[in-house]
Image: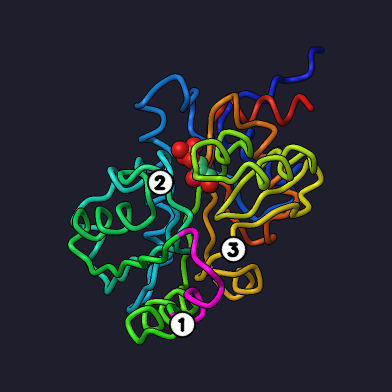
């Protein structure tokens, strides 16, 4: 009698949940790095789950990246039947414009016919400028909304890929390398054990806010992110829902 192979998606989901010790994993078939269609599936799967948790009023905080852009693309007007406000999770950790949290937010709001807010915080300013900047009423208003988000959707990236994609200073880049960071999520860098080794100093969502957010979705797939996903999930709050693909799942389960 040969042991049955774990290959069905629900079985993969169950196995991944118990291995990562999180409340829920959603697995789509295929490799999202190889196929744009699979990446869209990640987005659709994530949105389907979120839909079942919407309340009368919702504040959805989102990060940037190409996976988040795929989530935005998958949104449709019927998603917004409830009161929705999209806000960027954190300010000033931008990459190229089209994959920045602000842009993704705007797109999500447009596609679901909902509202959004932007957070324009410059990356490199003196502490003095920064401190007066965040006293601005318009900035404070957005920060207040971010702090009361009930849903967070974020990507997970490979640490070095993300550091290079951003305007990371040589000094910070060296720190990220030296500390053996392998994962990045919402501006925090993590080593293999899921310990934070570096963070981008900016306003918006802070770590202590995570526990208060009822629904957290980490969306990431593709073979090159296996290490990053494994590491980040060691850190992730237990109520995080991981939305990933088959390639990542099988690789993590293989150990
Ligand atoms: O924080 C991680 C990044 O958002 C991941 O970016 O979806 O383009 O790989 P990506």
* Vertical arrangement, residue 87 with respect to residue 181, above or below: below
The residue that disc 1 covers is: 132
Number of the front mark, 2 or 3: 3
Q: Is residue 219 visible?
A: no
Q: Is the distance from the Cβ of mark 2 to the nearest ligand 1 atom less than 8 Å?
A: yes
First in sequence, mark 3 or 1: give its number.
1
* Vertical arrangement, residue 143 with respect to residue 49, above or below: below
Alpha-carbon neighbours of circle 2 within 10 Å: few (<14), some, or many (≥20)?
many
Number of the front mark, 3 or 1: 1
Determine the secondary structure under disc 2.
Answer: helix
* Vertical arrangement, residue 24 with respect to residue 214, above or below: above
Question: What's the residue at 41%, 83% (across, down)?
Answer: 140
Structural distance between the alpha carbons of marks 1 and 2: 31 Å
First in sequence, mark 1 or 2: give its number.
2
Residues in magenta?
A: 123-132
Structural distance between the alpha carbons of marks 2 and 3: 21 Å
Q: Main secondary structure of the magenta part?
A: helix
Q: Is residue 163 left or right of residue 82?
A: right
Residue 217 percent location from the top left of the image? 52, 54
Contact flag, marks 1 and 2 (Cβ < 8 Å): no
Alpha-carbon neighbours of circle 3 within 10 Å: few (<14), some, or many (≥20)?
some
Label ID, residue 68: 2
Residue 116 percent location from the top left of the image? 27, 67
Question: What's the residue at 55%, 55% (across, down)?
Answer: 186
Determine the secondary structure under disc 3.
Answer: loop
The residue that disc 3 covers is: 201
Taking the magenta stretch, the answer to whether it contains residue 124 is: yes
First in sequence, mark 2 or 3: give its number.
2
Determine the secondary structure under disc 1.
Answer: helix
* Vertical arrangement, residue 195 with respect to residue 33, above or below: below
Residue 196 percent location from the top left of the image? 74, 55
Q: Is residue 246 visible?
A: yes
């Amino acid at each position: 009698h040969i042991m049955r192979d774990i290959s069905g998606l629900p079985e993969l989901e169950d196995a991944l949940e118990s291995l990562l010790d999180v409340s829920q994993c959603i697995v789509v078939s295929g490799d999202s790095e190889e196929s744009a269609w699979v990446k869209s599936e990640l987005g659709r799967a994530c949105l389907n789950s979120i839909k079942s948790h919407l309340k009368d009023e919702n504040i959805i905080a989102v990060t940037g990246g190409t996976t988040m852009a795929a989530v935005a693309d998958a949104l449709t007007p019927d998603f917004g039947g409830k009161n929705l406000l999209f806000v960027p999770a954190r300010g000033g950790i931008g990459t190229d414009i089209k994959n920045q949290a602000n842009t993704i937010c705007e797109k999500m709001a447009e596609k679901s016919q909902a509202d959004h807010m932007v957070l324009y915080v410059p990356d490199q300013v003196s502490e003095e400028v920064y401190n007066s900047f965040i006293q601005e009423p318009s900035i404070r208003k957005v920060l207040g909304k971010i702090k009361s988000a009930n849903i967070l959707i974020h990507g997970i990236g490979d640490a070095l890929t993300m550091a290079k994609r951003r305007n990371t200073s040589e000094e910070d880049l060296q720190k990220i390398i030296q500390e053996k960071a392998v994962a990045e999520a919402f501006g925090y860098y993590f080593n293999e054990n899921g310990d934070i080794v570096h963070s981008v100093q900016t306003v918006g969502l802070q770590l202590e806010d995570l526990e208060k957010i009822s629904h957290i979705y980490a969306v990431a797939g593709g073979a090159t992110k296996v290490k990053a996903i494994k590491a980040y999930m060691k850190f992730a709050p237990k109520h995080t829902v991981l939305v990933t693909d088959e390639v990542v799942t099988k690789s993590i389960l293989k150990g």
